[in-house]
Amino acid sequence: MNTLKILIACEYSGIVRDEFITKGHDAMSCDLLPTESPGPHYQGDVFDIINDGWDMMIAHPPCTDIAVSGAAWFKQKIADGRQQKALEFVKCLMNAPIPRICIENPVSVISSKIRKPDQIIQPWMFGHETTKTTCLWLKNLSLLIPTNIVGKGERKTYASGKSSPLWHANSGGGCGHTRSKTYQGIAAAMADQWA
């Protein structure tokens, strides 16, 4: 097995990083926040280390200003430049000088402003009984093959008739740090199938 040098950008949890390390790869996470899990982590700007000879990058850029779940605030975010700044960040990650790249994000304006995702996955395809629509924009990486298809999990129905997965309802919704973590089954599939 060839050991790959893998950057997990915009990850503070260490979930994806640790899956690649378990497979014997030289993986490092990077985020403005400190890591929650001991391991190789660069706390700072990803562009400080983007040119360090990585074989692969899996990036989880912040979705706060681009996810369609926050569409009610788009007008303000467009007017003050936050959305454009977030999209420029994504473009820079997509164009990084790294042979294999995955950009992971929820349903967002990346699809309409940059390009449509190569794949849309759900946690229930990888052993977690819940829904969380996750888009992948891929460069020189294969589509992820589901590893353990299970039920879609319970949902909470509101008085309005709308519903959401329990994880979302119990977290208060939105795109906060806890709610943005990668599911273990998806991280394991990335490490198994891409490395």
Image (cartoon, helix red, strand yellow):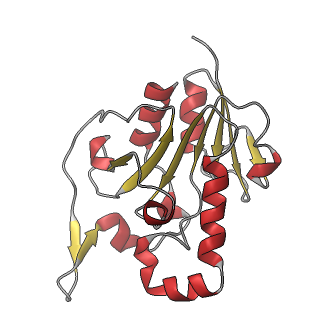
Residue 192 in picture, x, y percent from top left: 45, 26
Q: Residue at x 52, y 70 (%)?
A: 66
- In the picture provided, is 185 more to the left or to the right than 100? left
Residue 76 visible here: yes
Residue 172 visible here: no
Q: Residue at x 65, y 28 (%)?
A: 55
> As rendered, which of 48 and 176 lies closer to the eye?
48
> In the picture shown, does residue 173 fall above or below 58?
below
> In the picture shown, does residue 71 fall above or below 137?
below
Q: Which quarter of the rendering shows the N terminus? A: top right
> As rendered, which of 79 and 5 lies closer to the eye?
79
Kindly indicate the quadrant of the structure image that contains residue 163: bottom left
> As rendered, which of 132 and 36 lies closer to the eye?
132
Residue 109 in picture, x, y percent from top left: 46, 67
Kindly indicate the quadrant of the structure image that contains residue 134: bottom left
Residue 186 in picture, x, y percent from top left: 41, 41
